[in-house]
Image: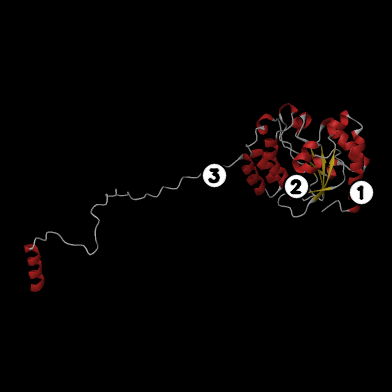
Amino acid sequence: MDDALALLRLQAEWGADEAIDPDPIDRLRPLQPETPPTRLAAPAATTAVVTPADRAMELAGRAATLDELRAALAGFDGCALRDTAGTLVFAEGDPASTTLLIGEPPGRDEDRGGHPFAGAEGQLLDQMLGSIGLVRAALMLTPLLPWRPPGGRPPSPAEIAMCLPFLHRLIVLLGPHRIVLFGNSPARALMPRTANRRRIVQGWADLSIPDMQKAIPTLVLPNLLEMLKNPPLRREAWVGMRLLRRSLDIGPTKK
């Protein structure tokens, strides 16, 4: 301890006035500004955008029965057609039937009474079914959309997209063995490739529905209203009706 103190006193007498670092220091190097500490940016708040189509899929997916599906439709406010239409037009018929008929969006008669395939078009359908020994009460019938577009105009792609999850869910709940589509709108919505063909009566085609493992044999027939205006189209429809009758004769008509 005394030696260290004597050595320090000796250095002070020699003029040493600062401590020497073990490593050399470049006194001529410009001073670098101090870098402020980096602050982590707070994560931006993300808000999931829920579209009407998303809500439709959620509501439809929750429905475990036809009554629940009808209630979900009645409470769905994502489609403006609900506010302009007079009545909700839901599926009718025998839920145990394995044949489902899907028609164009509701017309004036359907909108007034709330029943699918009504008016002159419904009468033509009854005649067509009777020609092959069927009645509508033994089948299930539903329109493509549950509400009539204003003035009977064609539905927009957005309106179809918002209502399609409910129709898909209806098909899942019914589990039909066969489906018959009347008109281009149901064909475009459910079977776009078939609808693009020049002649829509091409026999049975497979229809794939979300949440269903097997495709459903499906016929595409002319629009009932067009058949009323253009009777020759009934010849094409008759081909499809005979195919339907043959399918019913081969397979079971009840689950």
Of the numbered discs 2 and 1, the one sitting upstream in the chain is: 2
* Drawn side of residue 38 relative to residue 46, left or right: left
Q: Nearer the viewer, residue 142 or 55?
A: 55
**Callout in the foreground (1, 3):** 3
Mark 2–mark 1 distance (CA, rounded to whole Å): 22 Å
| Tag 1–tag 3 contact (CB < 8 Å) | no
Does dot 1 land on a helix, a strand or a loop?
Answer: helix
Which of the 4 quarters of the picture holds residue 225? top right
Of the numbered discs 1 and 3, the one sitting upstream in the chain is: 3
Mark 2–mark 3 distance (CA, rounded to whole Å): 29 Å
Q: Nearer the viewer, residue 185 or 149?
A: 185
Which of the 4 quarters of the picture holds residue 55? top right
Count the labels in the image: 3
Across and down, in percent, residue 250 comes to 90, 53
Q: How is the image coloured?
A: secondary structure
Q: Quadrant of the N terminus?
A: bottom left
Which residue matches tag 3? Answer: 48
- Does 222 appear above or below 24? above
Across and down, in percent, residue 210 comes to 71, 50
Which residue matches tag 1? Answer: 246
Residue 228 shows in the view? yes
Which residue matches tag 2? Answer: 171
Q: Amino acid at mark 2?
A: Ile
Residue at 64% x, 41% y is 53
Which of the 4 quarters of the picture holds residue 70? top right
Residue 98 shows in the view? no
Residue at 72% x, 43% y is 167
